[in-house]
Image (cartoon, rainbow, N blue to C red):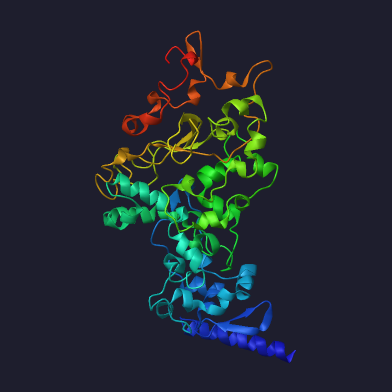
């Protein structure tokens, strides 16, 4: 009883001091797991585990939340984004990262209640922005390899720089400063660093600690992976769109992303590749469905196995985009997306035959590229826009056995839902293929070379 009274007196005294001292220097918090352990806000950990104190000293946001392909990011209050609590915090305390101390990664000054002082001395809010120095101290192999990872944005940087008239991602720093700022404010909301997968939510997911500062070796599929891959991978895999169903690998096997996409692929292998399909660690259908078993599984496989990628027959309709949602200035032409996201299904000539050898025709997806992508930041940013098609090779994550092409009427062949045929002057199934007439004026020079005009069997229609 005496201990309880003394504790109440102590808490009352602390409350009075809090009113007198606006910095709340003598605030005390008690951890639920051990009421003898007390941390004052005169430390990094004490401040960031004291929710009430964070609410008193936080700084309001000064920039709009991130936005992107999947829409606007959910909003978390600044104090919620930096609060360390719950089971994640308890897990963090048991880890080797906790023993290193806050300033080892974040710099700054510990053992002070002065927020400005704590965040001085080259303070870094996201240490993995300097992953070579910070993460690489202990994880040198992963950090060295990550430099060329597509998760680090090398694929996007390659196309931005080459379309801008430079050589490739190695020239990214030579872009006009405003364009670099535009990339950082938009593209980098997903293409980030180690912490975006393993410690915090990516900006497009609202930012902030994802689990009380716990280091998550395996990212959560829904909270992390799909928050960035929402408009394409997640959108398809979960069967979000009207008229679609979840991927068979989810419904039959309950696979998460990491069942197919390993750390070796996601971290990179230290070798620069032009785009993701050139990765040696990339999973393929044949990893589970061997060529010997699949190629002759039925007559359709026997005929088309070496001509099409699997998705031509086994994908559902998938999400496409027509222009990046880069923050255009109000009143400028092209503000927002010129072409909102839409479901479609297009077969075209293989745009990367040197990477995906053997496939004559493949699925393609309309990309975010448009000549005026960077108009809000710099004029005439894309003098070499036609360097790449506006449709990319794609492998939608929405596989099912029976699709609109594989499920046909009794007595009909599979070709009845795939091959173009002329019925009374109407070309049936033509909408499945990418023709030159499907392109907008500014897409013609870049993309006509992969359209199917003049490349289909002459027997399929009077036009060919």
Residue 191 horizontal/vertical position (percent): 45, 54
Q: Relative to residue 121, is residue 342 drawn left or right? A: right
On the question of residue 77 being in view, the answer is no
- Percent coordinates x, y for residue 112 in the rendering: 46, 84
Q: Residue at x 48, y 73 (%)?
A: 137
- Side of 244 where 461 appears, left or right: left
Residue 403 in the image, given as x and y percentages of width and height: 62, 29
Given the current orientation, which residue lies at the most extreme right position? 1
Look at the image and tell me in which quarter the N terminus lies.
bottom right
Relative vertical location of residue 183 with respect to residue 367 in this rendering, above or below: below
Q: Foreground: 452 or 60? A: 452
**Which residue does the image show at 32% across and 40% down from the upper left?**
387
Residue 96 versus residue 273 in the image, above or below:
below
The correct choice, above or below, for 287 with respect to 15 in the image is above
Please report the residue visible at 71 percent of the width from the left and 90 percent of the height from the top.
3
Residue 443 seen by the camera: yes
Q: Quadrant location of residue 317?
A: top right
Q: Nearer the viewer, residue 398 or 71?
A: 398
> Where does the image place residue 214, in percent across and percent down from the top left?
59, 68
């Amino acid at each position: 009883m005496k201990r309880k009274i003394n504790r109440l007196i102590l808490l009352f005294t602390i409350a009075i001091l809090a009113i007198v001292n606006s910095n709340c220097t003598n605030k005390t918090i008690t951890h639920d797991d051990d009421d003898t352990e007390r941390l004052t806000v005169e430390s990094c950990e004490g401040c960031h585990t004291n929710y009430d104190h964070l609410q008193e000293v936080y700084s309001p946001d000064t920039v709009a939340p991130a936005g992107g392909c999947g829409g606007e990011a959910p909003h978390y209050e600044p104090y919620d984004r930096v609060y360390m609590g719950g089971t994640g915090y308890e897990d963090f305390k048991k880890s080797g990262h906790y023993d290193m101390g806050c300033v080892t990664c974040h710099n700054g000054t510990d053992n002070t209640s002065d927020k400005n002082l704590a965040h001085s001395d080259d303070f870094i809010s996201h240490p993995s922005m300097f992953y070579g120095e910070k993460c690489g101290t202990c994880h040198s192999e992963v950090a060295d390899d990550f430099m060329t990872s597509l998760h680090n944005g090398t694929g996007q940087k390659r196309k931005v720089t080459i379309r801008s008239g430079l050589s490739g991602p190695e020239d990214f720093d030579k872009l006009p400063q405003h364009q670099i700022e535009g990339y950082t404010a938009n593209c980098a909301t997903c293409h980030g660093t180690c912490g975006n997968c393993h410690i915090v939510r990516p900006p497009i997911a609202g930012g902030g600690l994802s689990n009380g500062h716990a280091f998550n070796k395996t990212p959560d599929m829904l909270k992390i992976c799909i928050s960035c891959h929402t408009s394409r991978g997640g959108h398809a895999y979960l069967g979000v769109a009207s008229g679609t169903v979840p991927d068979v690998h989810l419904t039959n096997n309950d696979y998460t992303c990491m069942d197919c996409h390993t750390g070796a692929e996601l971290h990179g292998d230290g070798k620069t590749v032009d785009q993701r399909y050139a990765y040696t660690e990339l999973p393929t259908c044949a990893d589970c469905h061997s060529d010997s078993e699949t190629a002759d599984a039925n007559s359709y496989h026997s005929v088309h196995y070496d001509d099409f990628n699997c998705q031509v027959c086994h994908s559902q309709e998938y999400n496409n985009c027509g222009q990046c949602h880069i923050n255009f200035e109000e009143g400028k032409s092209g503000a927002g997306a010129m072409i909102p996201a839409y479901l479609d299904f297009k077969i075209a000539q293989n745009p990367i035959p040197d990477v995906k050898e053997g496939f004559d025709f493949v699925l393609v997806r309309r990309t975010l590229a448009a000549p005026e992508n960077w108009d809000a930041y710099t004029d005439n940013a894309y003098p070499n826009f036609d360097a790449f098609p506006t449709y990319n090779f794609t492998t939608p994550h929405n596989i099912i056995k029976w699709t609109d092409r594989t499920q046909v009427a009794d007595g009909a062949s599979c070709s009845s839902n795939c091959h173009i045929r002329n019925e009374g002057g109407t070309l049936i199934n033509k909408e499945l293929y990418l023709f030159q007439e499907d392109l907008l004026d500014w897409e013609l020079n870049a993309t006509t070379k992969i359209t199917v005009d003049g490349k289909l069997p002459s027997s399929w229609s009077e036009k060919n």
